[in-house]
Image (tube, rainbow, N blue to C red):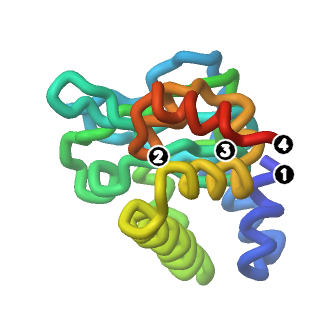
Amino acid sequence: MKQLLNYIQSKFPINNDDINFLEKCFTKEDVPAQTKLLEAGKIEQYIYFLNSGIVKGYQNIDGKLVVQHLVSEQDFFTSLDSFMNRTPSLDYYETITDCTLIKISKSNFELLHRNTNFWGDFVKMVTNEHLSCKIERVKDFQILTAKERYLKFINQHPKLASNVSVDNIASFLGIEPQSLSRIRKQITF
């Protein structure tokens, strides 16, 4: 919980009452590797803060798993549309490694929104940060070569690069696994 509070405090000033309220609204859960947190067709029940570990988010498109999210520590994730609108998700979320999650339910999310001054602005800021990342990712697909996307990925996410399978990284970067293997052989560190 301390890491979540530190993350929030790094973005917004919060007081002791806010901290106590946050501690009541979020719950901690330790989850083993290869655990499905959400399956397509189900309604997302939580927003998660990844305290430790690695999580992937993907869709099954015509029988092919397409990794759209690789989440590392100190970040939020959820199937946002499903969580906010109570609609069936198109996404799957699964732990890659053992994870410690801090999660909040929809009712507690709304409770925080109604009873604190910072929560709405904090959620908007985190959502905008994630949207900016998605826009940059789309731009990268449009202008960078596969090799350039991989180099950017390993520079920005060295922990993911060393702890996530080649297949998952390749899918995330929109590269065939064989092509990524060739790219990795060309790169000398």
Q: Amino acid at mark 1?
A: Lys
Question: Which is closer to the viewer, label 1 or label 2?
Answer: 2
Of residues 11 and 54, the one nearer the viewer is: 54
Of residues 110 and 88, the one nearer the viewer is: 88
Quadrant location of residue 122?
Answer: bottom right
Q: CA distance from mark 3 to mark 4?
A: 23 Å
Q: x, y percentage for residue 156?
A: 70, 57
- Report the residue at 72% width, 70% height from top: 18
Q: Secondary structure at mark 4?
A: loop
Q: Which residue is labeled 1 in the image?
A: 2
Q: Amino acid at mark 2?
A: Leu
Residue 107 in the figure: left or right of residue 180: left
Q: CA distance from mark 1 to mark 4?
A: 36 Å
Badge 2 vs badge 4, beta-carbon distance below 8 Å: no
The answer, for residue 89, to whether it is visible in the render is yes
Q: Secondary structure at mark 3?
A: loop
Q: Is residue 185 above or below residue 109?
A: above
Residue placed furthest toward the left? 62
Q: Which residue is labeled 2 in the image?
A: 173
Question: Which is closer to the viewer, label 3 or label 1?
Answer: 3
Q: CA distance from mark 2 to mark 3?
A: 16 Å
Q: Which residue is labeled 3 in the image?
A: 72
- Report the residue at 78% width, 47% height from top: 1
- Decide which of tag 2 and tag 3 comes sooner along the chain: 3
Question: Which is closer to the viewer, label 3 or label 4?
Answer: 4
